[in-house]
Image: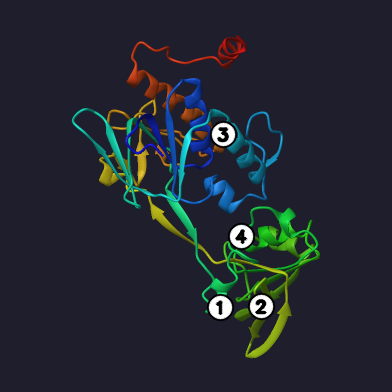
Amino acid sequence: MRNNYIYDVVIVGGGTTGLYTSFYTKLRKMTTLLIEATSDFGGKVAQFYPEKHIYDVGAHPVVSGEELVGRLLEQSQSAEPEVVTGEFVEQIRKRENDIFEVETNSGKLYMARTIILASGMGTYQMKPLRLTEAPLYEGKNLHYHLKSPEKFRDLRVTVYAMNRTGIDWAMALEKTAKEVVLLNQQDYFLYTPPQVIEALEKTSIQVKYNHKVTKLMGNSRGLHTLFVDQDGMEMMYETDALLYYENVNLTQTPFISWGIETDKNKVLVDHGMATNVPGIFAAGDAVQYPKKNMLIATGFTEAITAVNSAKLYLDPSASAQVYSTIEYQKNRG
């Protein structure tokens, strides 16, 4: 990684908007660095609904969250941006020469002429299962995300959750798993409308209320047995995989400390996606303006606008936008 290199643009955030932004900068011939705070791309779509169908993205009558993220990642990689993962941007400072310094939690420093914020509201970390032996099986067959139901084909899967996310995971797994057991330590599901419970009851999923997992047992390959307490009675369940969801911790993007004007932690932008700091633009869920639609597709449009604005900031004589058909003809030659 060229830490002493000055990029045309640094994109903060590798969710759906950030990935598309990193592709579009290639059309504007901008040198690009994409910084993602986690080890994976796709943001909320990848973390919270990879198994769900999305119907409002152009050219996709229906697409799963996982598939959409995969295609966006492929599109981004075709543009060959430089990429950093696992680093959270803590500081953005503007020098007197108008070059931005971007400092991450690892102490690394990157420099850019413009910044595009596509970080959403921040970084989400799934809360881990608070059992002593849980770390032994994390990364094996104890999971905090459902990234692909196909990976659980013909397995006995246990989902341990007390809210709607657990139901969504269990219903997605029913199509591929050999058996799905849904454990809930309460006698009801949080944040779940009646129609979802009705749909759950029509499935083959074994739903067990008032079941609290107290201990895990396994070997070097992973866990294989759950010890469960039900009203003071201990029982054991054999399983091939355990998915756990309680809630998430949010590390908010520190917009205010960067000098970015916000309203309820939402970044305020003008019609060109420009923030109050010249040279810093924004797109995606963190952006706020009148009558904004909170859709994935909205982020794509905002990304195009932000990139074009950044290009004009760097070179006022540049064209306001480019047409991909023209670029295609140029590249054929």
Q: Nearer the viewer, residue 299 or 323?
A: 323
- In space, the residues marked 4 and 3 are separated at their CA atoms by 31 Å
- In space, the residues marked 1 and 3 are separated at their CA atoms by 38 Å
- In space, the residues marked 4 and 1 are separated at their CA atoms by 24 Å
The residue singled out by tag 1 in the image is 133
- In space, the residues marked 4 and 2 are separated at their CA atoms by 26 Å
Residue 46 screen position, x and y as percent: 58, 48
- In space, the residues marked 1 and 2 are separated at their CA atoms by 9 Å
- The part of the image, by quadrant, that contains residue 314 is top left
Q: Which mark is residue 322?
A: none
- The part of the image, by quadrant, that contains residue 60 is top right
- In space, the residues marked 3 and 2 are separated at their CA atoms by 39 Å
Q: Nearer the viewer, residue 324 or 221?
A: 221
Under tag 3, what secondary structure? helix
Q: Amino acid at mark 3?
A: Gln
Question: Image quadrant for the C terminus?
Answer: top right
Q: Is residue 150 left or right of residue 330?
A: right
Q: Earlier in the sequence, mark 3 or mark 2?
A: 3
Q: Earlier in the sequence, mark 4 or mark 2?
A: 4
The residue singled out by tag 3 in the image is 77
Q: Are marks 1 and 2 in contact (CB under 8 Å)?
A: yes
Q: Amino acid at mark 2?
A: Gly
Disc 1 crowd, CA 10 A, few/some/many (<14, 14-19, 20+): some
Q: Earlier in the sequence, mark 4 or mark 3?
A: 3
Residue lying at 44% horizontally and 52% vertically, measured from the top left? 123
Does 17 appear above or below 133? above
Under tag 2, what secondary structure? strand
Q: Earlier in the sequence, mark 4 or mark 1?
A: 1
The residue singled out by tag 2 in the image is 218
Report if residue 210 is visible in the image.
no
